[in-house]
Image (tube, rainbow, N blue to C red):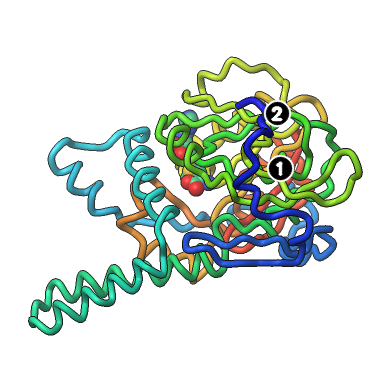
Amino acid sequence: MEILQSNTDHYFYSEDDFGRTELTPSYRVDLRNPMNEHLDKFINANLVSDWSQLTWKEVGKPYEVKTVAKEKREWENENGPMSVKKSWEFFNRSFHEWFVKDVPKEISKAKQKAWRYLSRFQMSEVKKALGETLRLSLWNYAHRIEDGIWDPRGKRALFEGLDVNRPRILFLGAAEGYEAMQLYAMYPGGEVVLVDYDEFCRTDRFGTFPESYPFLGTNPATGQPKVWYKDQMNIHYIVDDIRNLPFGKEFDIVISVGLLEHFPDEHKPEVLDWHRRFLKPGGYVIMTTPRYQLKSLLFYKIMADVMNHTYRELMDIRQMGLYVYEGGFEILRHGFIKVHNGIVARPR
Ligand SMILES: C[S@@+](CC[C@H](N)C(=O)[O-])C[C@H]1O[C@@H](n2cnc3c(N)ncnc32)[C@H](O)[C@@H]1O
């Protein structure tokens, strides 16, 4: 995408709105803490001072989420095992539907439905409508109220303090590309390359990502905080398998968000190698994976039909760090944001 600045009708927020947070029907707008001086949203875990001393015996292996989405089970009953790529295609379509919902409206519709069925004693329909109400309420809390999925404050705290200038940023398994847009806003003027082998991610997940969503970042002219929008950023989207990328070691930052935990142990070294392969000397690798915590266990259980199309693990920061360390990286920072572990690393 070229940098366009002609149509500014959707630039609803500006520097005058710093300090504000607001709920739209589908997501939270959060312009609090523009100077990023409160780094409290990224908890530096500092749990491990010497990764070479940590062993799998001490930390144990991650928890595997085993509940499978109904549509995947049904598809496999008819067609046999689903390929990994196809399971991502199912996941992306299913997950995307939730980001575009008018959540309060959907909750009230689902509740009305439950009452209607109850008045007719259609108990199995009541059960379905209550299930939908529960999922919507959980989504409302997790994404819209808590902002746990995008988590701009946590992500900004995790991305803070990188020594880069107009970086080229590569996002592996980019989906809608949120985190690379956040990085671009903080370190503007370079280029973002989003990579995902599911075309739907380019056309819909990224394509329909709200143009009016404000990212808090930096004004390169003044060094002061500034609001950025998607269409002001220099973004290219490649639809291909990461294994086919033509790049050399040319990126200042290589990032993935929720990728590593989708590969069983025998494939993790390859995934870690993807992060090293395209990185300039001195560049940064940033990775996050979902945390092993009670609320995540509940989330993946209740949202199983929405989320569970692919192999998935939940891990703690020590387990994640050990994979990253054994993959040949020096860990510069490790900690937690709202629902993910976060690591900033460099090849050793
Ligand atoms: C769990 S998603 C990343 C999380 C993302 N933030 C989200 O909200 O869905 C992982 C993405 O990686 C993509 N992906 C997985 N393996 C890939 C590969 N080998 N090449 C390209 N994309 C891949 C999937 O299509 C999927 O969109």
Say whether disc 1 or disc 2 marks the residue closer to the N-terminus: 1
Q: Residue at x 60, y 47 (%)?
A: 10
- State left or right for residue 104 relative to residue 115: right
The residue type indicated by label 2 comes to: Glu
The answer to whether the beta carbon of the residue marked 1 is less than 8 Å from any atom of ligand 1 is no
Asked whether 175 or 302 is in front, the reply is 175
x, y percent for residue 271: 55, 34
x, y percent for residue 254: 67, 34
Secondary structure at badge 2 equals strand
Say whether residue 66 is visible.
yes
* Quarter of image, res 303: bottom left
Q: CA distance from mark 1 to mark 2?
A: 10 Å
Which mark, residue 191? Answer: 2
x, y percent for residue 89: 35, 37
Secondary structure at badge 1 equals helix
- Quadrant for the C terminus in the image: top right
Q: Residue at x 50, y 57 (%)?
A: 314
Asked whether 186 or 103 is in front, the reply is 103
The residue type indicated by label 1 comes to: Leu
Residue where numbered disc 1 is placed:
183
- State left or right for residue 21 relative to residue 26: right
